[in-house]
Image (cartoon, rainbow, N blue to C red):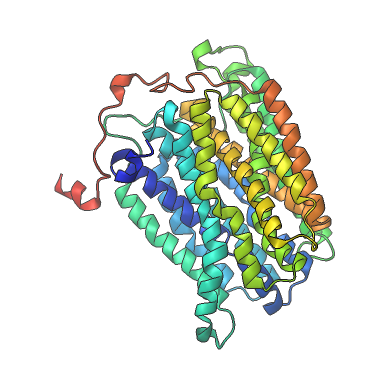
Amino acid sequence: MLKEMWSFKGRYGILHMTWFAFFLTFMCWFNFAPFATTIGKELHLAPEQIKTLGICNLALTIPARIIIGMLLDRFGPKVTFSTLLMFAIVPCLATALSQDFNQLVLSRLLMGIVGAGFVVGIRMVSEWFPPKEIGIAEGIYGGWGNFGAFGAEFALPMLAVSTAFISGGATNWRLAIALTGIIAALYGWVYYNNAQDTPPGKTYKKAKKSGAMEVTSVRSFYAMIISNFGLIFALGLLAWRLAQPAIHFLSIDGMLIVWLILGALFVYQTIKAIHVNQELLDGRKTYAPSERYEFRQVALLEFCYVVTFGSELAAVSMLPTFFEKTFALEHALAAMIAATYPFLNLISRPSGGLISDKLGSRKWTMTVITIGVGIGYLLAHGIGAGWPIGLAIAVTMFCAYFAQAGCGATYGIVPLLKKEITGQVSGNVGAYGNFGGVIFLTIYSLTSAKTLFEVMGVAALICAAMCAFFLKEPKGSFAAHYEEEPAAETPELPSYPRLAYDREKE
């Protein structure tokens, strides 16, 4: 596959178009972090407010990933991804035009919706690649798309400095942030006119029921409800953070109103879940063994994504400031050094998926990688001003490799659990990545970088132990076709994605 990939034809063309769409959503999502210090000085923000903006950037991605997962299973990845890319221009321009903290909070909350784009490509890639190649394919999609975070942290500061003459000599962060949204919106139009949901001759399988995830056992139903509550809790934690005296965004009454709304949302989610699974709960429906899946496996993958992608979100958000203050560096230099973390996505996430494909056990791949995550962050806990900066960068790269490889290994399993609800499973697992980011950044905002690294390291080691004892190898993990998809249904693919004018000729 690695050799064929460079042909840019058929499924490989779809893969390249889709990872670039993800790249642009991530560049938009992380376009604030490189300018956090500069924006803070220009708009007179307190350090606590800057940290809170980092949390706001993640918040709405939690419900957005679930909602987009449902829309994805209903409307398909082409329409869903194109719409999301075009929407990105709204929060990008809102951030670029912000004049105070309150406007930044609103713009970064909206930006969290753009961060939900990841789950769309997971379903698109799974439609075009068989199980035996799903790890490397999803790893390339996720890793090269995640490289957008590096693009934001490395390229945007240079763009802002090089265009400073437009704003009278000051770093032109507003133009840099606005451009990311404009480019994403334009590419949304390109993606809509050139992508296809499935290869020719293959039917896009939609979820049988919409509004909530369909489970196959009563025990799984209650596990799903607990999982939903965890995501609501993360949003409630953010509301509490915004109500702290140092932040000055929500009053106590405002926080209580938000909590009531979140409580109502949880009740609504539960009612929808009961409605979708009513026949199962009443005992009127049972599922054949071939149709069953355990929600416990979804929950384990959610925890894996907390300690891998959740820790990556936290690290990418705080590393520029961490290097700047720890080693007394210039802001632009600190941002470029911190960019080594997301830079490694180019190879680490695909390698996690490739190892998962080749090792012969997706379970033990996940276990070993999460052990590496834990060791890495516990090493990072010791970084201080007395360290050689080269060693600090090396430890950061070690953390980055295992965290990102863990993301690839996680999504080497997700599409294999239940094909027709891949969007919803991806949304739930992805939302828990953001849950982890919110929890870890809240800990960082209340304590220190050393405490954050320690907590992330211990959490990863606990996750590794749970994977070793409870994670199961998915059925058909290394098959040439999905179990429910006969070989005859996968015809030879076209040599390139059809362009708009090709369709007009037909």
**Is 158 positioned to the left or the right of 205 in the image?**
right
Query: Can see residue 296?
Result: yes
The correct choice, above or below, for 496 with respect to 34 in the image is: above
The residue that appears at 65% across and 31% down in the rendered structure is: 368
Q: Nearer the viewer, residue 335 or 107?
A: 335
- Give how far across and how far down residue 442 sits, in percent: 77, 53
Residue 305 falls in image quadrant: top right
> Going by the picture, which residue comes out furthest to the bottom?
168
Q: Nearer the viewer, residue 159 or 346?
A: 346
The correct choice, above or below, for 13 with respect to 324 in the image is: above
**Is 309 positioned to the left or the right of 178 in the image?**
right
> Going by the picture, which residue comes out furthest to the left?
505
Query: Can see residue 271?
Result: no
Q: Nearer the viewer, residue 435 or 223?
A: 435
The correct choice, above or below, for 474 with respect to 421 in the image is: above
Position of the C terminus by quadrant: top left
**Is 96 positioned to the left or the right of 99 in the image?**
left
The residue that appears at 55% across and 51% down in the rendered structure is: 344
Q: Nearer the viewer, residue 3 or 158?
A: 3
The residue that appears at 59% across and 29% down in the rendered structure is: 365
- Give how far across and how far down residue 10 sits, in percent: 29, 40
The correct choice, above or below, for 329 with respect to 468 in the image is: below
Position of the N terminus by quadrant: top left
- Give how far across and how far down residue 389 sits, in percent: 70, 62
